[in-house]
Structures are given as C-alpha cells and as structure tokens.
Image: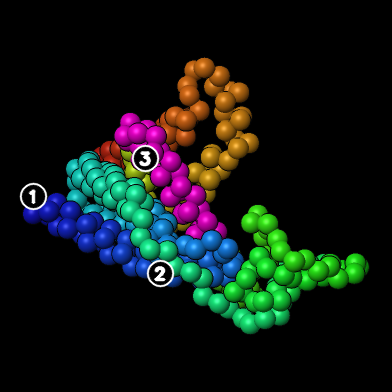
Amino acid sequence: MKKFAKLVLVFSISFLAIFLISTVFRFLALRVDWAKGLPVKPETTLTLMVTAAHWALSLSLFASLLFALGYSIRRGYFAIMTMVILMSLSFVFCFGISTILVNAKAVTPAQTSGIPLGDKGLMLSNTLNRNETVVVLLNGTAEPLGPRVRSIPGQPLVFQQSAGSDFELPPIAFGDDTPWFLKSLAIDLRLNANTLQQKFSEGFGSFLVYAGALILLLCSLGLAIRFSAWPLANLFLGILAFRGVLALEVFLSSLEIQEIMSAFLKDALPVSLAVSAIYIVISALLLLYSILIFISKRRYEYD
C-alpha cells in the first residue's frame, strides 16, 4: 500500500503544481488579450482569474494523468488498482475545483479599468488582411467608442462622432511569434474547459458521465502505451495520444458532427451522451488490447 500512497502523492502534487502555475500564466495571457482588444467595459481580476483557472484545470487533468501513468508504469504498479486510484483522484479534483470556481463567480469584486495604451490619434488595423480598415481613435484608448476616423481602402475617409457598444475595434498590434501547434493546443484546452464547465452547470450526473468517460479514456490510453522499453519514447507517444484525444473531442463536439450523430442515433441515445459513449467504447477496446498484450507476455515468459 505504500507504493500506492506514493502514487496518490505524486498525482496530487503534480496536479496542484501544474494547476497553480498554468493558472498564473494563463491569467497573464488573458490580461494581455483583454488590453489588446481595448475593452469598452471594465473587467474584474477575479473574472479573468476564474477563466484562467478553468483552462488550467483541463491542462492539469491531462498533464498530471500522463505524468502519473508514466510513473506507475515505470514502477510496475498493478494496472487495475492504478486506474481506480487515478480515476477517483482525477474526478475528485475536477469536481472540487469546478465547485470552487463556480462559487467564486458569485463574488462581485471591484472592477478594474483598462490600461491606456497609446495617446490621441492611435491608429488600429488588422495586419493579417491586405485590404484592412484602419481606425484612428482621435481621443486615444481613453475613449475607445469616442470620435474616430475610418479609412477603408478605395473609399474617402469617414468621420464618426461615436460608435455603438457592439462595434469591434481592430486589436493593438502586439507581436506574437507563438508556434501554431501551441496556439491550437491552447484553443483545444479552452474548448475542453468550456465543455467541462457546461457539463458541471447541467448537474452532477451530466458532469459525472462526461468527465468520468474522458478520464477513463485517458487512463486506458496511458496504460496501453507500452510500445517501447524506453520511458522517454513512451512519454512522447503518450503526449501525442493525449493530444489526439483533445483533437477528437473538438471534432466530435463540432456542430456538423453533432447533427450527423443526431440523425444517425435518432431516439436511441441522446446526443449529449453520444461523445461519452464513444469515449467508453474506445476505452473498452484499449483495455481489451492491454489485457491481450499482458496475457501474451505471460504465456511467452512461461514458454
């Protein structure tokens, strides 16, 4: 039991450490994005922190499970007991932190105003488009909805005294050299966090089914990755597999796939449970694969 106690400790420490560190970095990134977009409404630090924590919760779930599964495989822990422990801990951490974050949203702290970026006559444009519209803020970012001059290619300049609250300004041109694979990973983690948050708001049963199926898939996938005797190679294979789960979730949650599943299933199964059912089926196949590999190795050793 001591080695399983170590497994609990390893998972708990890694989960909390990843969660806290990633929450801080995500919060800083959201602050930059918020300032870059010139928000016309004041934002609260707590709101950004909760949003960052939701994103960090998804990252912590994937990363800590991958780390703990790799640790258990290297130590030769009993697979079934490992799955039970990690699945229980993962769900408890996800449910507990989600509960805290939902209660934190009910708090109404003091609002923080945007930091003025640029003086009067600030020019904003979308550099990703060759025929971009340039907006000149005559009073700067202090009045983002105040008087402005719009320059549309091929048309004369247009002066506007003010704009409606739904008017979107081009972002401030901050440099961003982040590789696309990291951006796509952050986007998929955000979508996963939104899904977990939505399932939590629907009730404990909905959250249990979805989060439980996702955790089961990750655990079964981690135990199935033993293609190499090199731990580092297995780690990279695990990272690719977990990344594939994120991409699969985004694919299955898309509107087009949801409509196809709804037409195919009809009244046999609610569409809200279809993704969880797919996760469970894939998990069953992976576990069956792991059992067959284990039996074949035992027979080879006896022969």
Q: Say which element carries label 1.
A: loop
Q: Is residue 187 magenta?
A: yes
For the residue carrying disc 2, how many other residues have a C-alpha within 10 Å: few (<14), some (14-19), or many (20+)? few
Q: Earlier in the sequence, mark 1 or mark 2?
A: 1
Q: Say which element carries label 2.
A: helix
In the image, residue 189 above or below residue 113: above
Q: Is residue 294 magenta?
A: no
- Position of the C terminus, as image quadrant, is top left
Q: Give left or right: position of 127 versus 13.
A: right
For the residue carrying disc 3, how many other residues have a C-alpha within 10 Å: few (<14), some (14-19), or many (20+)? many
What residue is pinned by disc 1?
Answer: 1
- Residue 225 image point, x, y percent: 37, 51
Which one is nearer the viewer's eye here, 244 or 180?
180
- In this view, the residue farthest toward the bottom is 119
Q: Amino acid at mark 1?
A: Met
- What residue range appears in magenta? 183-211
Residue drawn at (37%, 40%) of the image: 200
For the residue carrying disc 1, how many other residues have a C-alpha within 10 Å: few (<14), some (14-19), or many (20+)? few
What residue is pinned by disc 3?
Answer: 200
Residue drawn at (51%, 75%) of the image: 115
Which one is nearer the viewer's eye here, 19 or 31?
31
Marks 3 and 1, how far apart at CA: 33 Å
- Residue 75 image point, x, y percent: 20, 57
Q: Amino acid at mark 3?
A: Phe
Marks 2 and 3, how far apart at CA: 24 Å
Q: Earlier in the sequence, mark 2 or mark 3?
A: 2
What residue is pinned by disc 2?
Answer: 25
In the image, residue 274 above or below residue 252: above
Marks 1 and 2, how far apart at CA: 36 Å
- Residue 58 image point, x, y percent: 39, 53
